[in-house]
Amino acid sequence: MAKEKRIRDVIYGFITLDEQEQEIINRPEFQRLRRIKQLALTHMVYPGAMHTRFEHSIGVMQMASDMFDAVIRNTDPLILEDCGLNDEAVQKHYRKTVRLAALLHDIGHAPFSHAGEDLLPINKKTGKRYEHEAYSVAIVRERFKSIIENSEYGSISTDAVVYLIDGTSALPTDELLPLFAQLTSEQLDADRADYLLRDSYHIGVNYGIYDHRLLINSLRISNKWGSSPRIVIDKKGIHAAENLLIARYQMFMQVYRHKIRCVYNEHLELAIKAILLATKENKGFFPPPDKLDKYLEYDDVYIEALFKKHGGEHGLRIRNRKHWRWLGSTDEHHNGKMVSELKAKYGENNLRINYDRKQKPWYNGMNATLVCDKDGNCNELQFQSELVKALSQPKNTTHVFLKELLPS
């Protein structure tokens, strides 16, 4: 029997790791996640927000495992047989694939997590900026392929793990992978399910708390919607699903889009840009995915060490907590009444207008979650919940800051 190891976690109590997972975690590429904070400079507002991508990644693996186990446990045996999931060995194979994808989903994050993503370079083939998933995929393929494919659970495919991570790679010839992608890269996936609980715990707020046990235990497979089986939520779990979506909305409005956190993201981007330019790194951007050795040198610790020497004004503002002054927030966009009045009063060049450039609805009806009753009758979540329907519209918040001189 393979030697297992248990580690203590603030959310799940104990998480059990097999030898393969221990080997992955002990790799330098994974240990780097200890040096990337989950919430960038949120600790400037909430001092407890010092947790890292390392513990979150292990937590997502556990959450995905709990979800997978519930899906198998709650699904009618005849449906499992119809899907080819009635064999225990097959179940273990897919469970392991899901665990590995969940464990490695954030392996490619830039320093300071999402706050550093605007300094990832442009992909010359697509003309669009790389996202951290492109780095995760490159790292998994180049650094973890031999570990992934050496498994006691049969031939685990690196392509399958990659597909479950980013959801956009070429689909391998495995018809069940899209089913389990619902656990790793969709609206009620293990990533969101973990970070809401974990961020709330470390920050000391209740906004992200939801009934995760009920949500998990409401999951099962249905084959009565469309041509492919889907993971659905039993009707008894609809309030837990609503609760998660409301928790996500509240966390974004109270924490992730907090006005002071937003201004520190601005200072952080400008400080990192100055550092990359001073060190002659890729014209002020992080290295592309085909230069992984260089990219993996960057983490929060590396960048913070250069704030004083190369970070300029913004590095000093971060070090001394002397951010630009907040003038106001509004649901209006760039040219709304409040913003126009502030431009007239202070001059547009003296303002920093921060708005959510990646605004998305809190719930995406184009990729709907299904809710099914005991008779198998299913409908999309937004049509069974007025709360979720209301969250299907994006909400944009614009913050305005005054670019004051750095105090002496």
Image (cartoon, rainbow, N blue to C red):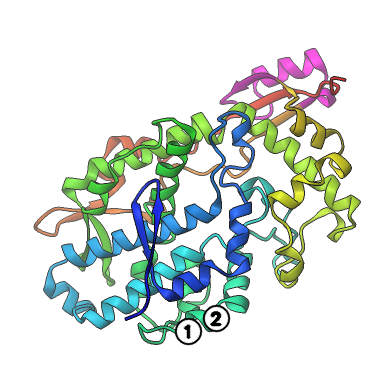
Looking at the image, residue 383 lies above or below residue 263 = below
Residue 357: percent from the left, percent from the top?
63, 42
State how far apart marks 1 and 2 are (Cα).
6 Å
Q: Are marks 1 and 2 in contact (CB under 8 Å)?
A: yes
Residue 109: percent from the left, percent from the top?
62, 57
Q: Could you tell whether 265 is left or right of 23 in the image?
A: right
Is any atom of residue 40 visible in this view? yes
Q: Residue furthest left?
A: 375
Label 2 packing within 10 angstroms: few (<14), some (14-19), many (20+): some
Asked where in the image residue 378 lies, by quadrant, the reply is bottom left
Residue 340: percent from the left, percent from the top?
72, 19
User: Is 33 within the magenta?
Assistant: no
Q: How many dots with numbers?
A: 2
Query: SS class of the residue under badge 1?
Result: loop
For the record, the magenta segment spans 326-351
Query: SS class of the residue under badge 2?
Result: helix
Looking at the image, residue 43 lies above or below residue 29 = above
Looking at the image, residue 343 lies above or below residue 79 = above
Q: Residue at x 75, y 24 (%)?
A: 324
User: Is 334 within the magenta?
Assistant: yes
Mark 2 — residue?
A: 145
Label 1 packing within 10 angstroms: few (<14), some (14-19), many (20+): some
Is any atom of residue 84 visible in this view? no
Q: Amino acid at mark 2?
A: Lys
Mark 1 — residue?
A: 149
Q: Front-most of 46 and 356? A: 46
Q: Amino acid at mark 1?
A: Glu
